[in-house]
Image (cartoon, rainbow, N blue to C red):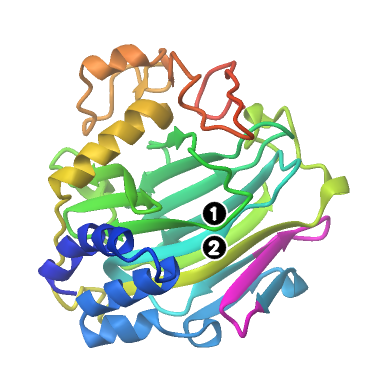
Amino acid sequence: MARRSLLLIPAILAAVLLAAPLQPRAAAYAATVDSLLPPAAAAAAALSFEEGYTQLFGDSNLMLHGGGKRVHIALDERTGAGFASRGAYHHGFFSASIKLPADYAAGVVVAFYMSNGDVYERTHDELDFEFLGNVRGREWRVQTNVYGNGSTAAGREERYGLWFDPTQDFHRYAILWSHDRITFYVDETPIREVVRTTSMGAQFPSKPMSLYATIWDGSSWATSGGRYKVNYKYAPYVAEFTDLGLHGCPAAADGSPAQPCEATMPPGQRSAMERFRARYMTYGYCYDRVRYPAPLPECGVGAEAEAFLPSGEARSTADRRGSRHGKRRRRTGGGADSAL
């Protein structure tokens, strides 16, 4: 994938989607991304589910709809479900429109992520979107995480509220991964950027990865530190996926990328990210002095740390939780996975 393609994808996507309101958002998104990519990457993005993905587990808990354009994965008393891309990629832009289960969903975890754990068991890389279910009347939470070279002992979690109800409609979640940086997006808004630094060393993800989507029982930790668990009275819990995007450079036989990739966030997008983080970020590992008395080396902690408790939780959460039915609720507790 050429440097220019990765650089322009997010900025041009936003411009086209705003300028063409009459064109369906998904179609505009796909057409714009494809126009920026080399033919090989565009072809990979256009694969059907049968051509581009494979079921990992869950037998009948994975179902295809709309001629294979939509994928439903479900969690019930028997099992969860999941699927993965057939190929591995070394950098690119990976996305999906996702609708999460409604009603009581405590303990339920829906994950959309990249990983190479099946190839590098002890030195795997991973880029995570994790959606953490909640009790009725409380919002789903979104968590991102980054692992490199098996660095699972150093969790780099961040958690956020959302400005919409993710159970009512589809919303797009995307990961832009290049040689020098990783950017997480929600509906064309960047929410997190991880920049390769010398201090991170091999802990910056650098090996080819596949794209995964799963739903599973995280009762032991996902909601209030395990206080609220999956209640299978409300099963099946169904997560819906559509507009799956594999806009990546297939890895070469030796694991190297076909071309070097580089991405820089445009100034307007950086401002949007800063506004999002100031309002909706509810936990940051860089501010967690309980887990990390000394911040991890890539953490440039400044004056904004005053907005966070020693647990890493935001001090003021009324405007950081997102809203459901127009109401906002204050969170309690602390720690990386302890708050509702």
Residue at the location (40% across, 53% down)? Answer: 187
Taking the image as shown, residue 101 lies to the left or right of residue 177, namely right
Q: Are marks 2 and 1 in contact (CB under 8 Å)?
A: yes
Residue type highlighted by circle 2: Ala
Determine the residue located farthest toward the right in the rendered image. 233
The stretch drawn in magenta includes residue 66 = yes
Specify the quadrant that holds the N terminus: bottom left
Location of residue 199 (image quadrant): top left
Residue at the location (58% across, 19% down)? Answer: 331
Q: Is residue 121 visible?
A: no
Residue type highlighted by circle 1: Ala
Q: Secondary structure at mark 2?
A: strand
Determine the residue located farthest toward the front in the rendered image. 22
Name the disc covering residue 213, or none. 2
Q: Nearer the viewer, residue 117 or 114?
A: 114
Name the disc covering residue 111, or none. 1
Residue at the location (18% across, 78% down)? Answer: 258
Q: What segment carries the magenta color?
A: 65-81
Residue at the location (36% across, 69% down)? Answer: 29
Q: Position of residue 205 (x, y in %)?
A: 29, 54
Q: Is residue 137 visible?
A: yes
